[in-house]
Image: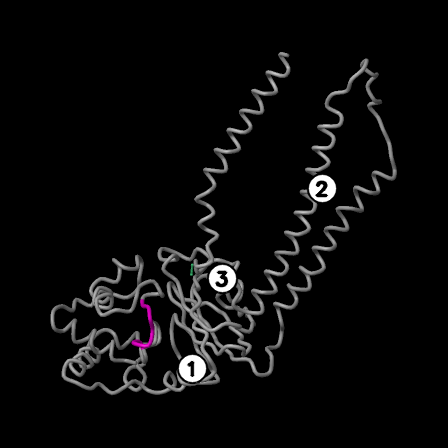
Amino acid sequence: MARAGLMACIRGHVERIGWSAMLAMLPLLSACSLKFPANTFVAHSDLTRAIQGLYWEVIGWTTAILILVCALVFLILFKYSTRPGPEKKPPPEEFESLTLEIAWIAGPALVLLLIAIPSIRLVFASQQVAPPPDALIVEITGHQWWWEATYPQYGIHTANEFHLPVGRPVRFVLTSADVIHSFWMPQLGAKRDVVPGHTNQITFTPTETGEDFGECAEFCGTSHANMRFRVFVDTKVGFDNWATNMASAARPAVGGRVRAGQNIFATSACTPCHTIRGFSAGKIAPDLTHFATRTTLAGGSFANTPSNVAKWITNPEAMKPGAQMPALGLRGPELTDLVAYLESLK
Ligand code: CUA
């Protein structure tokens, strides 16, 4: 009777702990929503799809093992916990079975082999030495804290927002100008270290049009968290239009305020750092030739709106701690004219 009471008490505790743990974990489920841009369960490229295939394969094997082990544990618990009749003498402490030993070495070895073969195959497939013949090449350089991009086949130079055509293989060639970064596109193409003095690559084919989120995934200093980027996968026509525009020189300034803004840009400390093609040739900060075509600014962290651009020019440090851009001390009409000029650079 006392034993039955003890068992009921233990069962009660286990149930309470179980329910509390499940309730405590409920908020975690919100992280499974498919609409979060860093959700790796959404595949927008052949590479992500292959990685997910491997993931589900491993989950399948490990779930089968979990079910087998749990079934054995419960079977033994219920079958051997109590036995009617007089107490038998305990089993011998030493017991040998060659068959059992072979089974518990061969079983796990087989499972490991079944996981290792597709894993190794995928590692090699994701590290193609030569790009596919028709691949789009995008050269990326990581900076503290923004991403520079060059499309050598198109003469395009831009920052933080990269366009790709759907269905065409792309090779990102990655290096860094300062410290180690990591180029991560959760739904497009896994993650690669971006190392100074060394090039890494990611090759994949985007399979869906739309906007994809990316960010630096290796701590690289004060504004590591503000080192984001966007990848826009366009239709072929959409990409060609974008590329033609991006390869052209900056639009000439039209209108009083825009022209006044252009003059302010020309005489400010902007020109030694920023390129506006056909106008200035600074190389250490993002190319601004088609700045207004970008949806974000300051390492992809803020929406590209006139008020954010004005805030950024007034006090970059407040928006991106550690930012290397100096505050230019522009105010009033000078500031609004410069913003109007930058926002005219389509
Ligand atoms: Cu670059 Cu973190």
For label 1, the SS is: helix
Q: Which residue, given by chain and number where applicable, does mark 3 sit on?
A: 186
Residue type indicated by callout 3 = Pro
Up/down of 168 relative to 327, above or below: below
What is the crowding at mark 3: few (fewer than 14 residues within 10 Å), some, or many (at least 20)? many
Question: Quick check: 122 left or right of 16?
Answer: right
Mark 3 or 1: the one toward you: 1
Image quarter of residue 86: top right
Q: CA distance from mark 1 to mark 2?
A: 52 Å
Image quarter of residue 296: bottom left
Q: Which residue, given by chain and number where applicable, does mark 1 sit on?
A: 238
Q: Is residue 93 magenta?
A: no
In the picture, which quadrant includes the N terminus?
top right
Mark 1 or 2: the one toward you: 2
Residue at 65 percent across and 53 percent down: it is 58
Range shown magenta:
291-297
Foreground: 269 or 46? 46
Q: CA distance from mark 3 to mark 1?
A: 23 Å
Say whether disc 2 or disc 3 marks the residue closer to the N-terminus.
2
The label number, if any, that marks residue 96 in the structure image: none
Q: Residue 328 at what x, y percent from top left?
A: 20, 68
